[in-house]
Image (cartoon, coloured by chain):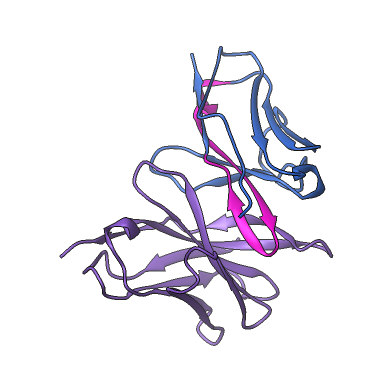
Amino acid sequence: QVQLQESGPGLVKPSETLSLTCIVSGGSMGSYQWNWIRQAPGKGLEWIGYIYNSGSTYYNPSLRSRVSISEDRSKNEFSLKMNSVTAADTAVFYCARAIPVANTGSFYFDSWGQGTLVIVSP
Amino acid sequence: SYDLTQPPSVSVSPGQTAIITCSGNKLGNKYASWYQQKPGQSPLLVIYQNDMRPSGIPERFSGSNSGNTATLAISGTQAMDEADYYCQAWDRSSGVFGGGTKLTVL
């Protein structure tokens, strides 16, 4: 059973860069899609982006200019960087594994981390 | 951008069937999945590929998807099913979530 664990600072100053890492245990990163998803306090889920096929990335168009996702398969982990953060970026950030539905371009999120709260404040 | 619309809230009596809808343009041409989220917890996959249940999810959870609407049905709803539910689909490589529906069992 794969397990995901997010780690990173819980407090980031406005205009700085948010950096989070997701450690994957209990399995290899294999041919799965690795995602970041966030949830602002009291709000719904927002997909941020993914890394897939050993390096291909795709981001939410609304965040594309500020985010990047990378991976280090030797450490079984992947990471999120989001620059120029504001208070509006305060959220619980989840990492999640997605499984592809063959030949469809569709995926589903079968495993999630516990989430980590990141507060953007001076 | 592609939008998925869910009712903000649905109420159901214990033992009855809860229906949660998710609307999007030609959603029936995509695969929908559904996630349950209880307070303080991570989301949990309850339906994938429109109507498939992951191992460990009770049979009372079912899904369908046609036209512009995907539907999550929970038959014989129990108090433990009270949670937020989110639909999700992919549009041109972007993941999209519905706004979520709070299911109240009363």
Q: Position of residue B42 (x, y in %)?
A: 47, 48
Q: Residue furthest bottom?
A: A74
User: Is residue B48 magenta-colored?
Assistant: no
Q: Is residue A79 above or below residue B28?
A: below
Q: Position of residue A95 (x, y in %)?
A: 49, 63
Q: Which chain identifier belongs to the blue chain?
A: B
**Nearer-the-camera pick, B58 or A61:** A61
Q: Position of residue A41 (x, y in %)?
A: 34, 46
Q: Residue furthest left?
A: A122
Q: Is residue B85 left or right of residue B72?
A: left
Q: Is residue B41 above or below residue A35?
A: above
Residue drawn at point x = 19 percent, y = 62 percent: A121
Residue drawn at point x = 76 percent, y = 48 percent: B49
Q: Residue furthest right?
A: A103
Colour seen for chain A: purple
Residue drawn at point x = 68 percent, y = 56 percent: B90
Over which residues does the magenta segment extend? B78-99
Q: Residue furthest front?
A: B1
**Nearer-the-camera pick, A78 or B24:** B24
Q: Quadrant of the N terminus of chain B?
A: bottom right
**Nearer-the-camera pick, B46 or B55:** B46
User: Is residue B98 magenta-colored?
Assistant: yes
Q: Is residue B26 left or right of residue A41?
A: right
Q: Position of residue B97 (x, y in %)?
A: 57, 48
Q: Is residue A65 left or right of residue B24?
A: left
Determine which quarter of the picture holds residue B46.
Answer: top right
